[in-house]
Image: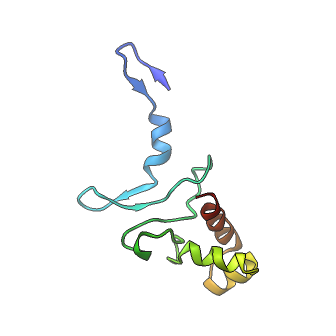
Amino acid sequence: MNLSRKGQLAFKELVDNYLDRVVADTKGFPEKIYPVRHKDVGKKPVLVSHLVGSGQPVTPKKGIRVSVLLNRNRAGESYQQIAEDYGLTEIEVEEAIRYMEAA
């Protein structure tokens, strides 16, 4: 963050990391949000949108509620078993579950 001579804060780099996590509709309203769980802003394991899953966190590619993945894992199923059932990768399942556990 830099303070210019005119007193303006310059934090473009910080903001740019997060702006691509919000997708707007044609009117400019937020339609999809990819929340950040931790410092790794490059990953988007979870999508929140009023258009998919009634606004509940879902997997971006398949629209599966992350709470379903979490509940199955807590019931003893492995990431591999869950991933195979839903056509996801184990990494997608693990990151989505980690998001829910941290939320």
Residue 54, position in %: x, y? Answer: 40, 74
Determine which quarter of the picture holds residue 96: bottom right
Residue at the image point whose x is 57% and y is 72% from the top: 66
* Identity of the residue drawn at 45% across and 40% down: 15
Is 74 situated above or below 46? below
Number of numbered discs overlaid on the protein picture? 0
Closest to the observer, 9 or 101: 101
Please state, as top left, top right, bottom left or bottom right, where the C terminus lies in the image: bottom right
Residues 35 and 60: in front is: 35
Q: Residue furthest top?
A: 5
Q: Nearer the viewer, residue 89 or 37?
A: 37
Q: Position of residue 93 (x, y in %)?
A: 66, 72
Q: Is residue 96 above or below residue 13?
A: below
Q: Is residue 3 above or below residue 58?
A: above
- x then y, percent, for residue 1: 50, 26
Judge from the rendering whether residue 82 lies leftward or rightward of residue 7; answer left or right.
Answer: right
What colouring style does the render use? rainbow
The extreme bottom residue here reads 85
Residue lying at 62% horizontally and 50% vertically, measured from the top left: 40
- The residue lying furthest to the left in this view is 27
> Relative to residue 80, is residue 5 drawn left or right?
left
Q: Examine the image and state in which quarter residue 51 appears.
A: bottom left
Indicate the position of residue 90 as horizontal and vertical percent values. Answer: 70, 73
**Which residue is pictured at 44% across the width and 19% down the height?**
3
